[in-house]
Amino acid sequence: MSINRIALLGIDGSGKSTMSKLIKQHLERYGYSVTIVPFHKWVIADKLRNVFGRYIDKDRESRNKQYTPPPKSLSAIIKPPVAFIDNLIFYRINSPKQKKDVYIYDRFICATQIKFFGLGYSNKWFKKMWWSIKPDYAIVFDVNVDESVKRQLSRNDPYAYTQEILINEKKLYIEYAEYHNFPIIQSKDVETTKKSVLKIINELFNISDN
């Protein structure tokens, strides 16, 4: 099976963006055309939010703050399926066109729903749908929650989530990796993590990196 779609998954601060850039540089040395796709962009969901957000999230103070909607509220119920549909469209648009094209997804469809799940949104009712969709390959980065928070704060991330939320997300990422038989890499320092990641990439693409 050819590998054209690779997703990098893990909680915030696990090293996905850094590793995606290193994988891109590595594969391009061997003639691949590599595109990094940040999977937190929207096709239509942001436009809908701009129009209807004040009605759906009327008790939310700011988009730059953590927000857990009341259980069974309109926000908790409607956002996950809308985001899911948007992610499917986004995935369809941002897919490889040629055999030598490789798309690296920084997050994936499941990541949006895992974040919603951690925040208390209602998406368990269609979990089988977002759980079953997978790329050609994925690598899950497992990082200590304390280290995750430290990394987020070091980059002034306004969405530094609570440890409880991160623990719940981390558990789901591990379960997702085990369910689809994807590797789990301990996210340590950049060089150590890079070595583990490129070993996997070389095996996937039959690269002898001497």
Image: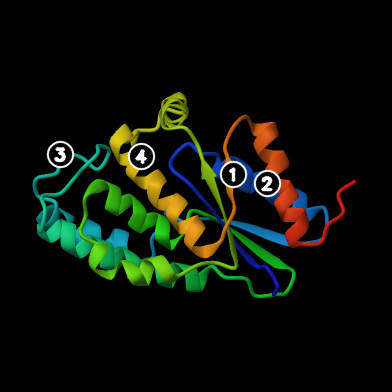
Mark 2 crowdedness (10 Å alpha carbons): few <14, some 14-19, many ≥20 = many
Marks 1/2 in contact by CB < 8 Å: the verdict is yes
Q: Secondary structure at mark 4?
A: helix
Q: Earlier in the sequence, mark 2 or mark 4?
A: 4
Residue highlighted by disc 2 = 197
Q: Earlier in the sequence, mark 3 or mark 2?
A: 3
Answer above or below: position of 6 versus 209. Answer: below
42 displayed left or right of 28: left
The amino acid pointed to by label 3 is Glu
The residue at the far right in this view is: 210
Residue highlighted by disc 3 = 61
Which label was assigned to residue 166? Answer: 4
Residue 16, position as x, y percentages in the image? 55, 45
Answer above or below: position of 99 versus 165. Answer: below
Residue highlighted by disc 1 = 185
Q: Nearer the viewer, mark 4 or mark 3?
A: 4
Residue 48 seen: no
Residue 168, position as x, y percentages in the image? 33, 44
The image quarter in which residue 175 lies? bottom left
Residue lying at 34% horizontally and 70% vertically, measured from the top left = 128
Residue lying at 45% horizontally and 58% vertically, measured from the top left = 176
Q: For marks 3 and 1, give the CA distance.
A: 37 Å
